[in-house]
Image (tube, helix red, strand yellow):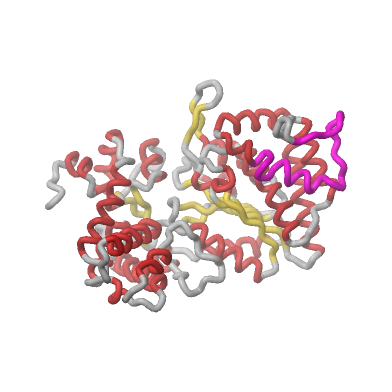
């Protein structure tokens, strides 16, 4: 009798694989066109002593964090000290700004250094702490200082952790976009002073790790790819958050004097290669269906790799033991559109349905229920304004990337981007193509 509860837990789509998980990890480079973790590692190594800045782009929940974890593991093996954190997880929201990212970066450097028994030089922490106090970028009434706002250098590192941590400014930054705007406005009264304070702290951290025999410091800012397209500011004006972060304030994000990796939204409307001097590493969806004028070998290999992903997650259980018919797995792979998170969610929901029905294996009915439920989730994202452009994408397998509607579609994963050899293909997510709304718009019987 299969342990369906254990199988259900094995398909957790929200758990990135750790760097050393070679049991479940599948190298998807052949179907993605690039060895993401290896390329990031080599880029940093080749930069030498010069600070370098790297972007990783892809659909949300497409496996970027797993690749970043692998990169961190490789960098650690090559004697780099790494600090990694998830911006969106720390802020509990998707409407942050460059100031929030840099503040969190400073906090995580100090905190993670302390966890390893390394103390950031007191005066560098003192400078940033005093800046935050002077500009009143603090939590009113929760922390007290002397009348001049000066900080004892001996307590500065711990104070900085408190200021930026869970019960300090970190809590404030969770207050949504309006609070983020207030904090940014306070900081931008002296942007140069803020950047210098953060840079001095990071520079000292670099010196510390070099003195301990490391080759350098690498900071990984995950979660920036989840940044919303826009938000309304205090004056009622709509602000493009992605352009503001990665274009307007690219210089500030590249002012940190060490190696930094940022994840970036797939929907950002800019030529980032010109602004950042390096093109982003792209993590596309995996081709699973035959595209017009594209060799079928790409979709064939994509299905094979995703089958391997499932097989690795099952451990000692075979695919034949789990599914009443192995063709049912192909149905789930096709429904996922080659997006790994969706595939894991579909299988998990099918397993849950089998448990509810007290069945020993996954049947056609369980698969249909899982697909139907996931289809409903995507249906809720489909707006009438998208229908016309969806038809164009469906017909030509491409789109105008600078279209506002396209930005929303790719950000919400209603359309997926693929790399097949030297060609980029855009297609509807299969679950969107299957919605009643889209089928009616195309005047096609959904059952045909």
Q: Residue at x 38, y 68 (%)?
A: 7
In the image, residue 198 lies at what x, y percent?
74, 44
In the image, residue 71 lies at what x, y percent?
58, 64
Do we see residue 423 in this rendering? Answer: no
Question: With respect to residue 145, does 354 lie above or below?
Answer: below
Q: Residue at x 69, y 64 (%)?
A: 80
Which one is nearer the viewer's eye here, 400 or 61? 61
In the image, residue 426 lies at what x, y percent?
33, 51
**Which quadrant holds residue 165?**
top right
**Which quadrant holds residue 171?**
top right
Examine the structure image and report whether residue 226 is included in the region drawn in magenta. Answer: no
**Which quadrant holds residue 212?**
bottom right
Q: How many marks?
A: 0
Question: With respect to residue 238, does 247 lie above or below?
Answer: below
In the image, residue 317 lies at what x, y percent?
36, 76
Which one is nearer the viewer's eye here, 386 or 274? 386
Examine the structure image and report whether residue 162 is included in the region drawn in magenta. Answer: yes
Q: Residue at x 59, y 50 (%)?
A: 277
The stretch of residues the image draws in magenta is 143-170
Residue 152 is left or right of residue 237, and the answer is: right
Which one is nearer the viewer's eye here, 351 or 212? 351
Residue 272 is left or right of residue 388, and the answer is: right
Residue 274 is left or right of residue 149, and the answer is: left
Residue 407 is left or right of residue 254, and the answer is: left
Which one is nearer the viewer's eye here, 195 or 309? 309
């Amino acid at each position: 009798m299969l342990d369906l509860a254990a199988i259900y837990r094995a398909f957790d789509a929200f758990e990135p694989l750790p760097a050393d998980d070679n049991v479940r990890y599948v190298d998807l480079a052949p179907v993605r066109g690039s060895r993401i973790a290896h390329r990031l590692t080599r880029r940093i190594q080749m930069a030498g002593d010069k600070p370098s800045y790297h972007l990783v782009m892809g659909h949300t929940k497409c496996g970027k964090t797993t690749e970043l974890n692998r990169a961190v593991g490789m960098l650690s093996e090559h004697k780099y000290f790494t600090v990694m954190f998830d911006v969106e997880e720390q802020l509990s929201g998707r409407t942050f700004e460059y100031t929030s990212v840099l503040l969190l970066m400073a906090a995580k450097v100090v905190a993670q250094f302390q966890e390893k028994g390394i103390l950031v030089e007191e005066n560098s922490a003192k400078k940033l702490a005093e800046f935050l106090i002077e500009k009143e970028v603090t939590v009113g009434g929760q922390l007290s200082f002397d009348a001049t706002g000066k900080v004892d250098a001996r307590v500065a590192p711990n104070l900085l952790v408190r200021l930026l941590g869970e019960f300090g400014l970190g809590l404030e930054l969770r207050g949504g976009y309006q609070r983020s705007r207030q904090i940014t406005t306070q900081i931008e009264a002296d942007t140069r002073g803020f950047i210098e304070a953060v840079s001095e702290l990071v520079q000292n951290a670099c010196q510390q790790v070099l003195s301990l025999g490391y080759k350098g410091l690498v900071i990984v800012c995950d979660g920036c790819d989840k940044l919303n397209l826009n938000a309304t500011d205090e004056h009622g004006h709509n602000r493009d958050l992605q352009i503001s972060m990665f274009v307007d304030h690219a210089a500030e994000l590249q002012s940190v004097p060490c190696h930094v990796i940022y994840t970036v939204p797939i929907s950002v409307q800019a030529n980032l290669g010109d602004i950042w001097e390096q093109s982003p590493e792209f993590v596309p969806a995996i081709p699973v269906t035959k595209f017009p004028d594209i060799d079928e070998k790409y979709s064939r290999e994509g299905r094979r790799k995703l089958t391997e992903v499932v097989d690795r997650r099952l451990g000692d259980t075979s695919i034949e033991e789990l599914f009443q018919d192995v063709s049912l797995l192909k149905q789930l792979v096709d429904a996922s559109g080659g997006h790994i998170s969706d595939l894991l969610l579909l299988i998990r929901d099918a397993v849950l349905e089998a448990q509810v029905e007290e069945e020993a294996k996954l049947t056609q009915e369980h698969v249909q229920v899982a697909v139907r439920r996931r289809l409903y989730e995507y249906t809720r994202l489909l707006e009438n304004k998208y229908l016309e452009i969806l038809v164009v994408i469906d017909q030509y397998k491409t789109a105008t990337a600078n279209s506002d509607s396209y930005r929303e579609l790719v950000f919400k994963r209603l359309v997926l981007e693929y790399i097949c050899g030297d060609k980029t293909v855009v297609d509807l997510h299969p679950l969107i193509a299957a919605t009643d709304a889209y089928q009616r718009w195309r005047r096609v019987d959904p059952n045909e």
